[in-house]
Amino acid sequence: MSAPVLVTDPQDPRVADFRNLKDGDRPVGTPRGTGPVIVEGVPAVQRLLASPYRVRAVFGVPGRVAALDLPEGMPAYEADKWVLSEVIGFRLTRGVVASADRRPPADVGDLLAGPDPAAPRRLAVLEALNDAENLGSIARSAVALGIHGLLLDPRCADPLYRRAVRVSMGHVLGLPFAVLPEWPAGLDRLHEAGYTTVALTPAADAVDLGGLDPVAHPRTAVLLGAEGPGLTREAQQAARVRARIPMRPGVDSLGVAAAAAIAFATLR
Amino acid sequence: MSAPVLVTDPQDPRVADFRNLKDGDRPVGTPRGTGPVIVEGVPAVQRLLASPYRVRAVFGVPGRVAALDLPEGMPAYEADKWVLSEVIGFRLTRGVVASADRRPPADVGDLLAGPDPAAPRRLAVLEALNDAENLGSIARSAVALGIHGLLLDPRCADPLYRRAVRVSMGHVLGLPFAVLPEWPAGLDRLHEAGYTTVALTPAADAVDLGGLDPVAHPRTAVLLGAEGPGLTREAQQAARVRARIPMRPGVDSLGVAAAAAIAFATLR
């Protein structure tokens, strides 16, 4: 790689992607979910480099940028930690940050079909999951536990928002996702594509998730609702199976990210 | 209950427990882990009321305090949201906050023995888990999934710190915990008490956690390390079993809170 360019002026337009990151996932005045993808920390930036997302720029303290071994021609900037903090608006403990162009969500049909129509397939379907950190945590577990993609209803948080990317440790960049605009009616597209839809609920009348035979259900989509309210009744009714994680009686529920991890491990 | 006392002066000494909560888990100038326990939000405060912790005061916006149906004689204060924010130092989205006296950690021997020496027992042992939010998340999953208590090495975060209590949704107040000062040599106390210690690691040479027979190991303690480094080699060597959660090849690891949830569900 060529040497990173030293930035000494916090107003330098070449690091504009990184200005005031706490203001949200987008430059002020632009609509939600249109700003560049922001990725923090060496392991997550390495996952970005291995992902299909096109890197716009990398910016960090000197040693950290050089350690990334960036490809020739990739815009790379370094600054001392004071200038870096002044640009991004907080003290960046992870030493390096990168920006990348967004990619549109996957096509629902493609995500459902997968590369091999005969292969077993696991998806996670998220309803109204508006907390970016829970979404990031779910994406990280999904990648580790062999979930092939996420389907999001339109009220979910933006999976490419900075906090989601951070909590996922960059893994969300390697996980296809699609948006299911008709909700929950669109779940019938999963049934037509051969999926068993499994609504996760703590309700006592649901079946034990561990009893679901993976051989009998080679294509499974597990539905998870937001922290607190959980899945709506409509989503539960639209699913083929309502399943529960066995829990101690009298306890309300697990956190949604913990429930997702258990469900993914159980359905593996 | 008697009517809550209206507070109009942010400097009112009766709500001193709640002053500048972002400054940490303690009043400035006092050592770590000595301030009152701070509990936010109606469900968590309800769990506090059902716990062995002695409540010092409850403070919130008017409707929220009355809805708690506090016992007669419990100090209860209400204020409009401006005064409340001025006292605590941020906008309290959960509308109510309570303080309670700390309780000392449980005795290690008592925690290991449990009420019935013949009963199956599950513990979680945490090494250097210095992130309060991960600790809170693990405590919540532990309560939901039938873990009887936590054993902490001395480098762990304070489980009674405000952020740990919040992420646990107050469940940490119903979960006994003890500190194991000799680390990892103290793990032998678990072996002497009949526990199978299970070190969780993503290492390829570890056994599959799901293969551990709960009947052959009625008393099990699962060891978890900090996010990133994981369990030290010394802790892994001191444990009787090294076990892994099956993961997709090439993925580094799950988050520690997700791994804990899966382990607790698997050992249930």
Image (cartoon, coloured by chain):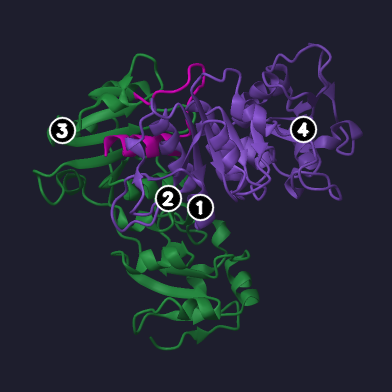
Chain colours: A purple, B green
- Residue under label 2: A201
B5 relative to A19, above or below: below
From the viewer's perspective, tell me whether residue B261 is left or right of residue A122.
left
Q: Nearer the viewer, mark 1 or mark 4?
A: 1
Residue A168 appears anywhere in the view: no
Label 4 Cα neighbours within 10 Å, binned few <14 / some 14-19 / many ≥20: some
Residue B83 versus residue A166: which sits nearer the camera? A166
The image's mark for residue A102 is 4
Q: Which residue is drawn at 24% across and 30% down?
A: B197
Marks 1 and 2 close (CB-CB < 8 Å):
yes
Label 1 Cα neighbours within 10 Å, binned few <14 / some 14-19 / many ≥20: many
Residue B235 versus residue A162: which sits nearer the camera? A162
Three-letter amino acid code of the residue under disc 2: Thr
Q: Nearer the viewer, mark 1 or mark 3?
A: 1
- Residue under label 3: B215
To the question of a shared chain for discs 1 and 4, the answer is yes
- x, y percentage for residue A154? 67, 48
- Residue under label 1: A231
Q: What stretch is highlighted in magenta?
A: B244-268
- Figure quadrant of the C terminus of chain A: top left
**What is the C-alpha distance between the residues marked 1 and 3?**
35 Å
The subunit letter for the residue under badge 3 reads: B
Q: Nearer the viewer, mark 4 or mark 2?
A: 2
Three-letter amino acid code of the residue under disc 3: Val
Find out whether residue B255 is within the magenta segment.
Answer: yes
To the question of a shared chain for discs 4 and 2, the answer is yes
Q: Is mark 2 on a helix, strand or loop?
A: loop
Marks 3 and 2 close (CB-CB < 8 Å):
no
The subunit letter for the residue under badge 2 reads: A
Q: What element carries label 3?
A: loop
